C-alpha cells in the first residue's frame, strides 16, 4: 500500500539509494536534479504502474491504486486517495478544485478536492478482459470558450472515445445525465488521432480530421506542433510526419524510446508554432540493451544529445505542457535486497530536472561534501577544480577540530592529516595553503610543526634566494614557527592541543601569557616566554605594563630563580626600554624585600638583601655602541630619585644588619635598626648582654671592634650608655631589690679607660671615566662650566682657536653637560625641552661617525635628508668599511628602515667583518621585525653567532668560556628562526665541550619530529642522566636558561621512568627530584615496586606515606610498613 508520502526540499546530493549522484551522467548540457517527493510502501511491488502529470493548478501522481494530488510546486499534499483497482487516467479542472479519476474497473469519479467528497461515480465502460490492458487510455479536460465556467472532457477508452460537453461544475450531476454519446463514438480503433473543435450550433464537438492506426501502423502516442506530427509506435520508434500530406519526414529507428515529451524555453506554445521546431527539445525515456532506462534530452532537428541520465527500469516521464523548461520524472526504486527482483519497487520518487549552470551543480556537490564526484565533474566541465580541493581541505579542518589526541583515535586523525597533506599538494594557491597550515587545529605538536615546515618549504621554493623579496605569507609562517617553538619550550608537547595552540598563536598580547604564568607561580615558564617574546613588546613597553609585571609575581617565590631573572633580564630591559620605570622597580623591590621579614623570617635579612641589591648589581643594558652613548643620559635622570635612594638606603641597612649579626652577634629587627644610629646600636649591643659579668668579654670581642670600625670614641660612648641606662631604667624600678641594670652599669663603668678616633666614610659611587671630567670641570663654578659646555656643543663654527671643532667634540661636550647639570639648567640653556636636547645628541653622535668616515655632511643636511635615501647612498659607497657598516646598521635601527635587500647585505657584511658580539646585539634588536626573518642571511647570522663562541672554546672550560657557552644557548632559545638552525651541529659542539645538558637542549629544538625523536633517543642511550641533571642544576637552573631547563629535566626523568632504570639515581641527590616528579604526575606504582624489591620495605612505605600526604590522604600513623605497602598496592595508582 502506497501510503507513506514525504515531500522533500533536498536535491540529488542526498544519501542512500535515493541519490542519482552515483549514476552515469553525460552531455554538453547540465541539469540540476531535485528530489521533490518520496512515496513508500511497506511491501515491495513488482513493476508498479506509475504515471504523473504536471498541470497549472496541481500535480497528480498515480502509483497503482493510489492517487496523490499536490499543489503545482509539490510543496503541499492536497489529497491522497486509494481506489479499488488500478488507476488509468486522472484530470484536474476548475482551478484545481475538481479531480477526475478513471480506474481500471471502468468507474469514473468526480471528486471535490477541498471537501474531499466524491460527487459522482459512473461506469462509462466495462473493464477490459485483459488485466494488464488499460480501460481508459487518456483524459483531457479543457475550458469551453463559448460559456464561462463550462468545460468539455475528452475520454479515450480501450474501444472508443467519449466527448462530454457543456460540463458545468455548478450543476455537474445534471450535465452528466444529459451526455450526448452519439458523436463521441465516431473515433474508433486501438489508437487514434483526431482534431476536434467546439460546434455551438450542435452544442457539442465536431471532428475536423481523423488519423487512426490504420493509416500510421502501431502508433501509441501522437504530438502535433503546427504541421508537424511526432509519432511513437509500439516498436518504440519515434518518427516525424507532415500532417497535411501524411508523409513521413524523418524517423529514428536506432533509438528505442518508451516515452517522449517536447519542451521549449519559449514563452508560449504559439511562438513554438511560429518558429517551427528549432527551439524545441525532445525529452525521451530510452531503453538500453540490458533493460535499463536513460532519460535523454535531444536538440531538434539534429537530434544531438544534450544530456543523458541513467534511471531505473521502472520510470515514467511526467506529462506536462510544451512551454515548460522543467522536466519531471517519476522513478521507482528498489531497496538493496538481493532477494527482490530488479523490477521490485518499494519507493517511488518524483524528481525535477532543470537546466543549470555547471557552477551551480559544483556548488551543490561541494555543499554535500561529495568531493570525488565534484572533482571529476569540475574536470569534465572545465571548472575551477582547485575550489574542490579547497572546500575539501576546509572540511578536513572542521573534522580535525572535533578529533581528539587520544591514542584510541590516532588512526582516525592521522588519516585526516594525511588526507589534508595530499589535498594541499594539489592546490596552487600559496596564500590559501599558508593560511590553512596556520589556522588548522592540528592534533599534535609534531603534526603542527610538520605542516608549518611544509608551508615554509613550499614558499621558499618559489623565492629567488639571491634577491630577497618581501612575502607576507612567509613572514606569517616564520612567525608561527617561532611561536610554536615558544609553546614547546614553555609548556612542552604534552600540554599541546589544537585549540590551545590556535589560541596561543592568535594571542597578540605576549605579556598577557607572561603575567598569567607569574600569577600562577610558574616562574620558569614566564622566564622562557619573556626571553622569547621581549623583542616583540620592547618598543611598546610602558610604565603600566611594568606595574602589571611586578604585581603578577606571586609570593612566595623562589629567590634563587627570581633574583637572577631580575638581575640579568628584567632590570637591564627596564633601563633600556622604559628608564622612568626604574622608580617603580625600586619601590617594588624595596617593599618586596621588606615583606620577606614577615613571609620568610627564617632566611631574613639575607633574603631581603639578595632581592634589594639586584637593582644595583644588575647587568648594564645590552645596547648597541652608538645608541648607548645617549642611553646612559636617560638612566642618569632616574639614578637619584627618591625611590632609588630609599632602596639604596635599604640595601645599606640590610648589609649593616647582616654585619651586626654575623660580626657583632647583634640581631635587630629592620624597623628597630632604621631608628638607630651607630651610637644607639652600641647601646642595643650592650642591652642584649643578659649577664653583667659577660660585658667585658663581649665588649672586647664585638662592641669595641664595632666602635673602632665606625670611628666612635669608646670612653665617651660608654659614659653615654651609662647615662642612657640610668634614664631608662631608674624611673621604671618598682623594687629596692631590682638591681640588674645597676650591675650592668657597674660592669660598663669598669670598662672605662683613656683609649680613643672617630668616624670617616666616603662613598663616590660615579663612573670612573666621568670622574676625571668632573675633576677638571668642578674646579670652576657650575654656571661657568655649563655655559662653556653649551657653547662647545652648539657652536656653528668648525674651529676653536687653532684646533678643529669636530662633531665628536660637540657630542662629548654635550654628554658632559647632560651629566653635570640638572634638567632645568639644560632646558634654560637650550630653550628647548629635554627630549629635543637628547634628539640633538643622537644626531651629532651619528654626525661624528660620518666625520670619522670623512663624509662631509652638515647638521641641517642630516636632519632634512630623507633617511632611507641617505642610508642607501652611504651603503652603496662605503659598504667595504666596517665602521660604515656599523653606522648604516644603527641608522636603519634608529629610523626603522627595514629594506630586505639592504639588511641581507648588512648581515652578510657583519659576518664578513667577524663582528660577532656586535652582530648578536643587532640580531636581538631586529628580532621584533618579522619581515626581516625571511632575509636569507638572518638565519645564517644566528647560526654563526651561536657557533663561533663554541668553536673557540676547549676543555677544560674557563669561567669566561663557560659563560660564552651559556650565551650561545641563550641565543639558541632566543632565536626566532631556531627551526632553521643546524641543531645537530651545535649539539655536537656542546658534546665535545662536555656539556651534554646543553646538547640535549639543542636536540629538543630540532624542527623535524621524526629526526628529533631519533636523535634524542640515541643521545639518551649514550649519556649519563646524572651528569645532565647536575649541569641543569649548576648552569641552567637560574636566569635566562631556567625557563627551558625544566623541559630537559622532565625529559630525562620521564626517560628513566619509561625504562624503569631507577637505580641510576638511587644513591644520588637527584633521587628525591625523581620521587617528587613522579608524585606530581600521580604515577608512583613502578617506583614503589622498585623500592620494595631493590632497597627496603621501609623505604617504600616512607615514599607511600609522603605521597599520601601530598595527595591529602595521610596514612594512619601506627600503620606498619607492610600494611602501608599492601594498602597502596590494593587500590592506589
Image (tube, rainbow, N blue to C red):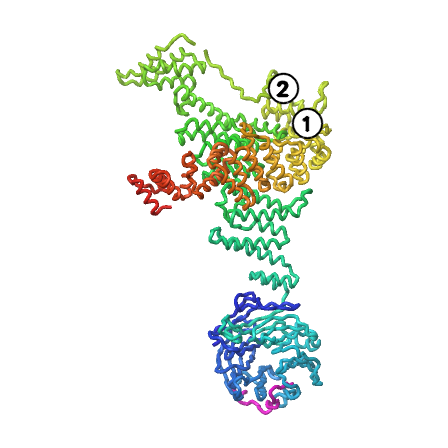
Q: Decide which of 1010, 755 is in the foreground and name it.
A: 1010
Helix, strand or loop for disc 1: helix
Asked if 381 appears above or below 234 in the picture, the reply is above
Q: Cβ–Cβ below 8 Å for labels 1 and 2?
A: no
x, y percent for residue 681: 40, 19
Badge 2 is on which residue? 785
Asked if 442 appears above or below 939 in the picture, the reply is below
Is disc 2 surrounded by few (<14), some (14 to 19) or many (20+) residues within 10 Å?
A: some
Badge 1 is on which residue? 848
Is disc 1 surrounded by few (<14), some (14 to 19) or many (20+) residues within 10 Å?
A: many
Q: Nearer the viewer, mark 1 or mark 2?
A: 1
What residue lies at 60% left-to-right and 37% top-to-bottom? 943
Residue at mark 1 to residue at mark 2: CA–CA distance: 23 Å
Helix, strand or loop for disc 2: helix
Q: Decide which of 121, 1072 is in the foreground and name it.
A: 1072
**Magenta region:** 173-196
Q: Is residue 150 visible?
A: no
Q: Is residue 193 magenta?
A: yes
What residue lies at 26% left-to-right and 16% top-to-bottom? 737
Residue extending furthest toward the bottom: 182
Give the left or right position of residue 839, taking residue 575 as reference. right
Number of labelled discs? 2
x, y percent for residue 602: 39, 29
x, y percent for residue 179: 56, 89
Amino acid at each position: 500500500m502506497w501510503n507513506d508520502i514525504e515531500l522533500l526540499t533536498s536535491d540529488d546530493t542526498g544519501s542512500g539509494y535515493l541519490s542519482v549522484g552515483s549514476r552515469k551522467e553525460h552531455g554538453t548540457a547540465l541539469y540540476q536534479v531535485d528530489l521533490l517527493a518520496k512515496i513508500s510502501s511497506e511491501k515491495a511491488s513488482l513493476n508498479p504502474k506509475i504515471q504523473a502529470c504536471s498541470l497549472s493548478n496541481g500535480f497528480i501522481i498515480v502509483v497503482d491504486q493510489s492517487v496523490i494530488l499536490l499543489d503545482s510546486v509539490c510543496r503541499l499534499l492536497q489529497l491522497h486517495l486509494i481506489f479499488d483497482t488500478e488507476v488509468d487516467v486522472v484530470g484536474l479542472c476548475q482551478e484545481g478544485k475538481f479531480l477526475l479519476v478513471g480506474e481500471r474497473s471502468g468507474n469514473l469519479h468526480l471528486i471535490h478536492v477541498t471537501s474531499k467528497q466524491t460527487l459522482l461515480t459512473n461506469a462509462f465502460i466495462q473493464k477490459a478482459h485483459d488485466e494488464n490492458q488499460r480501460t481508459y487510455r487518456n483524459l483531457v479536460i479543457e475550458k469551453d470558450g463559448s460559456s464561462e465556467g463550462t468545460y468539455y472532457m475528452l475520454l479515450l477508452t480501450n474501444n472508443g472515445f467519449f466527448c462530454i460537453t457543456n460540463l458545468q461544475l455548478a450543476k455537474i450531476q445534471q450535465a452528466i445525465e444529459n451526455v450526448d454519446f452519439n458523436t463521441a463514438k465516431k473515433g474508433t480503433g486501438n489508437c487514434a488521432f483526431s482534431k476536434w473543435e467546439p460546434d455551438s450550433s450542435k452544442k457539442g464537438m465536431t471532428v475536423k480530421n481523423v488519423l487512426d492506426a490504420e493509416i500510421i501502423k502501431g502508433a501509441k502516442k501522437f504530438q502535433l506542433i503546427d504541421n508537424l506530427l511526432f509519432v511513437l509506435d509500439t516498436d518504440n520508434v519515434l518518427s516525424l510526419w507532415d500532417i497535411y500530406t501524411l508523409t513521413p519526414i524523418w524517423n529514428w529507428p536506432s533509438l528505442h524510446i518508451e516515452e517522449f515529451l517536447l519542451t521549449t524555453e519559449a514563452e508560449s506554445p504559439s511562438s513554438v508554432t511560429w518558429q517551427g521546431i528549432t527551439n524545441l527539445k525532445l525529452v525521451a525515456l530510452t531503453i538500453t540493451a540490458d533493460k535499463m532506462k536513460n532519460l535523454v534530452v535531444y536538440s531538434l532537428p539534429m537530434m544531438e544529445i544534450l544530456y543523458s541520465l541513467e534511471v531505473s527500469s521502472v520510470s515514467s516521464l511526467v506529462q506536462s505542457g510544451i512551454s515548460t523548461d522543467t522536466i519531471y520524472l517519476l522513478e521507482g526504486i528498489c531497496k538493496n535486497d538481493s532477494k527482490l527482483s530488479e523490477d521490485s519497487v518499494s519507493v517511488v520518487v518524483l524528481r525535477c530536472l532543470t537546466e543549470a549552470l555547471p557552477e551551480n551543480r559544483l556548488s551543490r556537490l561541494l555543499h554535500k561534501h561529495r568531493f570525488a564526484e565534484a572533482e571529476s565533474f569540475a574536470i569534465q566541465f572545465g571548472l575551477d577544480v582547485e575550489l574542490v580541493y579547497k572546500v575539501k581541505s576546509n572540511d578536513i579542518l572542521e573534522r580535525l577540530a572535533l578529533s581528539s589526541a587520544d591514542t584510541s583515535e590516532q588512526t582516525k586523525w592521522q588519516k585526516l592529516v594525511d588526507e589534508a597533506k595530499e589535498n594541499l599538494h594539489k592546490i596552487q594557491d600559496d596564500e590559501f595553503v599558508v593560511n590553512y597550515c596556520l589556522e588548522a587545529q592540528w592534533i599534535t605538536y609534531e603534526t603542527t610543526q610538520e605542516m608549518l615546515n611544509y608551508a615554509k618549504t613550499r614558499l621558499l621554493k618559489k623565492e629567488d634566494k639571491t634577491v630577497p623579496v618581501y612575502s607576507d605569507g612567509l613572514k606569517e609562517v616564520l612567525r608561527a614557527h617561532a611561536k610554536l617553538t615558544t609553546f614547546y619550550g614553555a609548556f612542552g608537547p604534552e600540554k599541546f592541543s589544537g585549540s590551545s595552540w590556535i589560541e596561543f598563536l592568535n594571542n597578540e598580547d605576549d605579556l598577557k601569557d607572561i603575567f598569567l604564568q607569574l600569577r600562577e607561580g610558574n616562574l620558569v615558564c614566564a622566564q622562557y616566554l619573556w626571553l622569547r617574546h621581549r623583542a616583540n613588546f620592547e618598543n611598546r613597553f610602558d610604565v603600566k605594563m611594568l606595574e602589571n609585571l611586578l604585581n603578577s609575581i606571586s609570593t612566595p617565590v623562589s629567590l634563587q630563580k627570581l633574583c637572577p631573572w631580575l638581575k640579568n633580564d628584567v632590570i637591564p630591559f627596564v633601563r633600556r626600554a622604559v628608564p622612568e620605570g626604574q622608580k617603580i622597580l625600586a619601590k617594588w623591590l624595596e617593599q618586596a624585600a621588606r615583606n620577606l621579614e614577615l613571609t620568610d623570617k627564617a632566611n631574613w635579612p639575607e633574603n631581603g638583601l639578595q632581592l634589594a641589591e639586584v637593582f644595583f648589581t644588575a647587568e648594564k643594558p645590552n645596547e648597541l655602541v652608538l645608541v648607548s652613548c645617549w642611553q646612559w643620559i636617560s638612566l642618569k635622570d632616574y639614578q637619584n630619585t627618591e625611590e632609588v635612594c630609599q632602596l639604596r638606603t635599604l640595601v645599606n641597612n640590610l648589609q649593616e644588619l647582616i654585619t651586626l649579626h654575623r660580626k657583632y652577634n647583634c640581631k635587630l629587627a629592620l624597623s628597630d635598626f632604621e631608628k638607630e644610629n651607630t651610637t644607639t646600636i652600641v647601646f642595643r649591643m650592650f642591652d642584649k648582654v643578659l649577664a653583667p659579668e659577660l660585658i667585658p668579654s663581649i665588649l672586647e670581642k664585638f662592641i669595641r671592634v664595632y666602635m673602632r670600625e665606625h670611628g666612635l670614641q669608646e670612653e665617651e660612648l660608654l659614659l653615654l650608655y651609662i647615662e642612657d641606662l640610668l634614664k631608662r631604667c631608674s624611673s621604671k624600678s618598682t623594687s629596692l631589690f631590682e638591681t640588674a641594670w645597676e650591675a650592668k652599669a657597674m660592669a660598663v663603668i669598669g670598662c672605662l679607660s683613656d683609649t680613643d678616633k672617630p668616624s670617616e666614610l666616603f662613598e663616590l659611587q660615579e663612573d670612573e671615566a666621568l670622574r676625571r671630567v668632573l675633576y677638571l670641570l668642578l674646579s670652576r663654578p657650575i654656571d661657568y662650566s655649563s655655559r662653556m659646555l653649551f657653547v662647545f656643543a652648539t657652536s656653528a663654527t668648525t674651529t676653536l682657536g687653532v684646533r678643529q671643532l669636530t662633531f665628536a667634540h660637540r657630542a662629548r661636550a654635550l654628554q658632559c653637560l647632560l651629566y653635570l647639570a640638572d634638567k632645568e639648567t639644560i632646558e634654560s640653556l637650550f630653550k628647548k625641552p629635554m627630549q629635543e636636547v637628547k634628539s640633538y645628541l643622537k644626531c651629532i653622535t651619528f654626525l661624528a661617525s660620518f666625520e670619522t668616515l670623512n663624509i662631509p655632511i652638515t647638521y641641517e643636511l642630516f636632519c632634512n635628508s630623507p633617511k632611507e635615501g641617505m642610508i642607501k647612498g652611504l651603503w652603496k659607497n662605503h659598504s667595504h668599511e666596517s665602521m660604515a657598516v656599523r653606522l648604516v646598521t644603527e641608522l636603519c635601527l634608529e629610523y626603522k628602515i627595514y629594506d630586505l635587500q639592504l639588511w641581507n647585505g648588512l648581515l652578510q657584511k657583519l659576518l664578513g667583518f667577524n663582528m660577532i658580539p656586535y652582530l648578536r646585539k643587532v640580531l636581538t634588536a631586529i628580532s621584533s621585525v618579522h619581515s626581516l626573518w625571511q632575509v636569507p642571511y638572518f638565519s645564517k647570522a644566528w647560526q654563526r653567532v651561536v657557533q663561533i663562541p663554541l668553536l673557540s672554546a676547549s676543555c677544560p672550560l674557563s669561567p669566561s668560556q663557560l659563560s660564552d657557552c651559556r650565551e650561545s644557548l641563550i641565543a639558541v632559545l632566543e632565536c626566532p628562526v631556531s627551526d632553521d638552525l643546524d641543531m645537530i651541529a651545535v649539539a655536537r659542539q656542546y658534546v665535545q665541550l662536555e656539556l651534554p645538558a646543553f646538547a640535549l637542549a639543542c636536540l629538543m629544538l630540532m624542527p623535524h619530529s621524526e629526526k628529533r625523536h631519533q636523535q634524542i633517543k640515541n643521545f639518551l642511550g649514550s649519556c649519563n642522566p646524572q651528569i645532565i641533571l647536575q649541569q641543569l642544576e649548576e648552569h641552567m637552573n637560574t636566569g635566562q636558561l631556567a625557563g627551558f631547563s625544566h623541559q630537559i629535566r622532565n625529559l630525562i626523568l620521564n626517560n628513566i621512568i619509561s625504562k624503569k632504570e631507577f637505580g641510576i639515581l638511587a644513591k644520588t641527590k637527584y633521587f628525591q627530584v625523581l620521587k617528587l616528579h613522579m608524585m606530581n604526575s600521580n604515577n608512583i606504582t613502578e617506583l614503589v615496586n622498585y623500592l620494595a624489591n631493590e632497597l627496603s620495605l621501609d623505604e617504600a612505605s616512607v615514599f607511600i606515606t609522603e605521597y599520601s600526604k601530598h595527595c591529602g590522604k595521610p596514612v594512619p600513623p601506627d600503620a606498619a610498613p607492610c600494611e602501608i605497602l599492601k594498602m597502596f598496592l590494593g587500590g592506589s595508582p
